[in-house]
Amino acid sequence: MAPNRLINEKSPYLLQHAQNPVDWHPWSEKTFAKASSENKPVFLSIGYATCHWCHVMEKESFEDEEVAGYLNDTFICIKVDREERPDIDAVYMAACQMLTGSGGWPLNLFLTPDKKPFFAATYLPKNSRFGRAGLIELCRQVKNVWASQTAKVNESAASIAENMQRMFSFTPSAEPDESLLDLAYEQILRTYDPLSGGFDPAPKFPMPHRLLFLLRCFHRTGATKALEMVEKTLTAMRLGGIWDHVGFGFHRYSTDKNWLLPHFEKMLYDQALISIIYLETYQITKNPLYAKTADEIFAYVLRDMTSSDGAFFSAEDADSEGEEGKFYVWTVDEFRKQIQGDQAGMWEKILRLSPEGNFKEEASGRKTGANILHLTIGLNRWADKYGAKPEEIEKDWETIRSRLFHAREKRIHPLKDDKILLDWNGLMIAAFAFGARVLSNPRYAEAAENAVRFILSKMKDANGRLFHRYRDGELAVQAQAADYAFFIYGLISLYQATFDLAFAETAVNLQEAMIDAFWDDENGGFFTTGKETELPVRPKELYDSALPSANSVAFYNLLCLSRLTGNPKWEEKAQALLHAFSGTLNSQPTASTFFLTGLDFALRPGQEVVITGEAEKAEVHQLLSTLNLYFTPNKVTLVKSAQNADRLTRFAGFTDGLKVIEGETTAHLCRNGSCTGSTSDMKAAINQILEKR
């Protein structure tokens, strides 16, 4: 069979569909012109390479000759990778939610040739069953309706498109105060699962930005319940099957309330955001399990998700050999082959293995014979049960884990989505930079710097424009608001790890460019797309889902830049952004918890710490290393040396009067716009900085 038009694309997801009998087209104006000239509606199908149900629908419907015949006869068919085109996904997901009350992937819509939707659904089977319409039946219906009632369909689609804009409209209001943070905390508390950790019923998602917000609640109010919710959730996630105990890294989410049975795909953005919450929780508790988890996430990303050029890949699939999770699970016999001597019985008990398997098939409810490695209690408690030293059982497990890993490497691996996405790389840069600080590991700062260099050298065109996606030497899709916001977030974090002003200066320049390209001059806030949009509406997003919104991250960035530079224009823009969304935030605070971390930053006394001295002196490193051990979410730090004094003054004018005295290290402390003095006593400086006000 000859390939369809997707064969010339670079997206791994689109290439997966290039051999389908469906006559797929990539999204383009040329494709919609074809639909118009042939007077056909458009079938738009949106998914991503590591989406399990996208694979199911492909196998059942898009690889089926009969279904393909109906689709090709009725529609012009377009495939879109939602990760490559998040703007398209945002617009048509809003349409799906408006029309059906829910959404998800695969996302399937019927459009008029002018891109307006008149039907939306998620997974569609080949034939109708259990009340779910099948693709063949839908094709028959649409063909008849389009032929006999085209004007009526167009009228309905125009009405839907008009209402879609309201999905991206937000209500301004009086600026919220700390009572909104308290309200959000109380709402989160009501959704908390005290038995298993996490929030809401299954499926359970890690929701790292919600946990980040809870740590700030603990820091602000001392509410021990906030910290308890975070610790319970992080510990349950680490012990459960959502954590890859053999190869490290977190799977996408848990299908059950106990974190046992994951949806096995691994996403780069999850590794980034989850590692940050483990590191922040480590700063508060000093529990080594949290630091170890972050270290192991970084080990996974560096080993399996980093290109030879230093950029980070997007995801790994849930499926291998046509079966979800096959790469990750173990039969008892497979497990025993890797265990020497009489250890097998003990470790089968510790890791909850059984001959019949430790989870059930979703469809049949039968045990599978396969096992997901997981713990119900930590290894230190198992050491107590067996009368062993914790370090001995940890050493034994590392030996066993290594054997399992090398055996697993011989299996057929899930597909790796190796496209480079600017926004997701920005988050991973931020995570590695933060890890370099908290774990005192310069290798992590190097990883972040390598990714920045890749982006600035490979993901810009000759005109200096940033692009969203890179793969096989090809740039595609001009950078959108999230690309700018997340990359700026990473650059700010990297400056705080290295104090290389180039990163901070680049962040400022990109923030200026982001405002020019995406700011809504009429209503405030950042649009998702630039001024020249090819979509029926120009989306603007606030909701923090698996990824925080561009507006949430931009709000935080603007506040950071205000405090780093001392330039009030950044704080004024942050205030305008807050005003644009305040009404919506007041009514739905828990829908935007990353935004609320920025609000916490804005409302509480901030700290600006300027260290003057020779950057390589032991006293500077000692002070920074000590500060990085503690959770100080509203602190920014700058380092002024004889080498960078003039450059830092241009970047942060308020540092002009701070003198660098040869041979002396001094900490200059400012809080909430007022400087409280300077000291060369490093112990006194640390105590003042850590003092909460």
Image (spheres, helix red, strand yellow):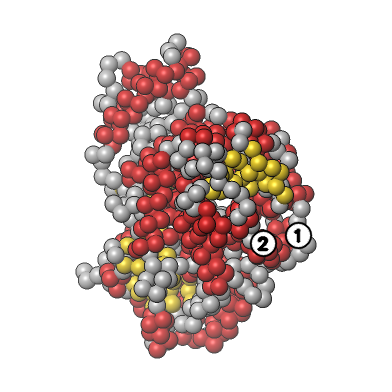
Up/down of 495 relative to 218, above or below: below
Q: Which residue in the structure is indicated by mark 1?
A: 175
Q: Give the percent coordinates (x, y) of residue 138.
A: 46, 71
Question: Label 1 vs label 2: CA separation?
Answer: 18 Å
Which of 69/567 is in front? 567
For residue 426, which numbered disc appears in the image? none
User: Which one is in front, 237 or 122?
Assistant: 237
Residue at the spot x=35%, y=21% of the render?
396
Which residue corresponds to the image point at 38% horizontal and 80% vertical from the top-left?
A: 31
Label 1's element? loop
Q: Residue furthest top?
A: 387
- According to the picture, the residue beneath numbered tag 2 turns out to be 568
Q: Amino acid at mark 1?
A: Glu
Q: How many marks?
A: 2
Three-letter amino acid code at disc 2? Pro
Which residue is situated farthest in the left direction here?
1
The residue mark sitting in front, 1 or 2, is: 2
Q: Residue at x 40, y 33 (%)?
A: 245
Quarter of the picture holding the C terminus: top right
